[in-house]
Image (spheres, rainbow, N blue to C red):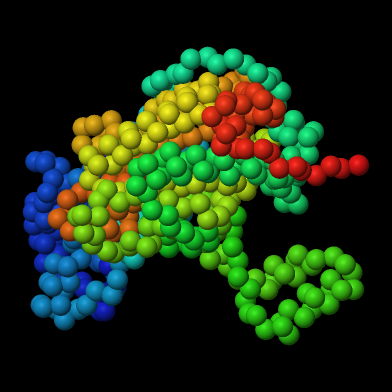
Amino acid sequence: MYFHLVGYFNTSAPANQADADIAALIGEANETFLTKGAPAGKGAKILNFRIEDQKIHIEIESDRYVRAHDAILRFKKPLAALLGKKYRIGIRGIEIESFVVKFPSNDPVKSTKIPYVSNIEFDGQEITVEMEINESQIQNRIPDRIITLIEDKIAMQGYGGKEEHWNLLWESEQKQVLCTEDPTAELLKESWIKHGAARGQWIYGPEITRLFRAFESIVVKEVLEFLGYREMIFPKLVPWSVWERSGHAKGVYPEIYYVCPPKTRDPDFWEEVSDYYKVTHEVPLDLIEQKIDKPIGGLCYAQCPPFWHFLQGTTIADDTFPARVFDRSGTSHRYESGGIHGIERVDEFHRIEIVWMGTPEQVVEESERIQERYKYIFEEILELTWRKAWVTPWFMAQEGLTGTAGRKSVGTIDYESFMPYRDGWLEFQNVSVNGDKYPTGFGVKSQSGSELWSGCSGVGLERWASALLAQKGLDPDNWSPAFRRIVGELPRGFKFL
């Protein structure tokens, strides 16, 4: 990695008389504090300088060990001491004229709109990045974050999709195929569901709602009560501060539904909106847009991050661990764009979120206990054809989290159900061990100071229904005896003429 910086120090008075002293200081810097912490022969070096009125121009090159933008900050303090003590001249700031970073890469970065980057080039072996930055941005580590961002983007480009990071762990026996129809089409035909007014939204009739409640009762009895979980209610409006700590702020933007509050509740401020509708019977969206404030966050996307605000900045007694909680209090929302399909992939969905926290050993053990309970449900109650696989999400792969503490324990296990109507598999359940991601992000500590990890598992009711109905169909006689007993007699739905 190579850095080249050209800039200057603004001074309170011309510093020409300090020319010799500055030259001597540069010679000392190149041999001492600009190489401190770097291997022998490495570090930063001031190539030349010149004094022009109230500017001290400077050129620096470096490697990755003492980066040029760090070097100019390192040099500022002794330079200020020299000029102030001997010449009564102050330094009023640093200006950067040119800043270029080069680093090896086998691939270009596809994105060209990166903050503070004016140009990116790739010659087949090396990426050259030109940045437009100032002293404040250097102090805030912006150059380093830009480099990390570009490296992450390249890693993500090469991720290659889930199939390259998917390892089968277990597969059930093939059960008898009792249905070959798309379950959503059958649900619509029987009027168990209707499209909602919003995109990716369904209205669920009495029959399928009974199925949802049956799934909930199974999860509560066979997983949550069996393992000792306590119910909580998590917020469903998530502010930016939560997503910043959870890490979702790095890339959640294309998938969330934004929440914008009104600029004021004053009826007079909104009167023209109301009047427009009364006259035209049309909602004036452009006018509303002018009267709402910037987004304060979004609707629930990943269900567990808002929970962590409950623990943020706290120290928890050791006898609390492993801590086990769950939430089933409302809908989650994701903008799925063109990926919407039936009730399998929707913008508004219903989910039970299971969260646990403790020592790394406790968290991994809890994951294994939950997996055993799911196996019991899918084999003995629902009697599905299913499998589970170890999946490395791309963000964990590129951050090296899968090898935490030398163990392949951080990551996600996906559960997939066979879908006869399309001769494929549907991910309908997961169990994740997230390492220290959330305790660290939200500043949660244990009484003993031992490391804390967490895990989570989302039970999607739409996905469970899709898995069951795709294999068994809508006729309860095709469902397992154990599940029929839990469901009971289906309520009578609506009969449309």
Q: Quadrant of residue 126?
A: top left
Image height check: is 53 above or below 346? below
Rendered residue at 13%/67% (across/down):
78
Closer to the camera, 73 or 256?
Answer: 256
Image height check: is 263 above or below 195? below
User: Would residue 48 be visible to someone looking at this image?
Assistant: no
Rendered residue at 13%/73% (across/down):
81
46 lies left or right of 177? left
464 lies left or right of 278? left
Percent across and percent down for residue 33 are 11, 56
Percent across and percent down for residue 472 are 63, 24
Image height check: is 408 above or below 170? below
Q: Quadrant of residue 20?
A: bottom left
Instruction: Classify the position of the C terminus by image quarter.
Output: top right
Rendered residue at 42%/25% (across/down):
389
Rendered residue at 49%/35% (across/down):
429
User: Would residue 381 be visible to someone looking at this image?
Assistant: yes
Give the total number of marks visible in the rendering.
0
Percent across and percent down for residue 269 are 71, 82
Percent across and percent down for residue 484 are 60, 32
67 lies left or right of 338? left
Closer to the camera, 23 or 269?
Answer: 269
Instruction: Classify the position of the N terminus by image quarter.
Output: top left
Closer to the camera, 457 or 155?
Answer: 457
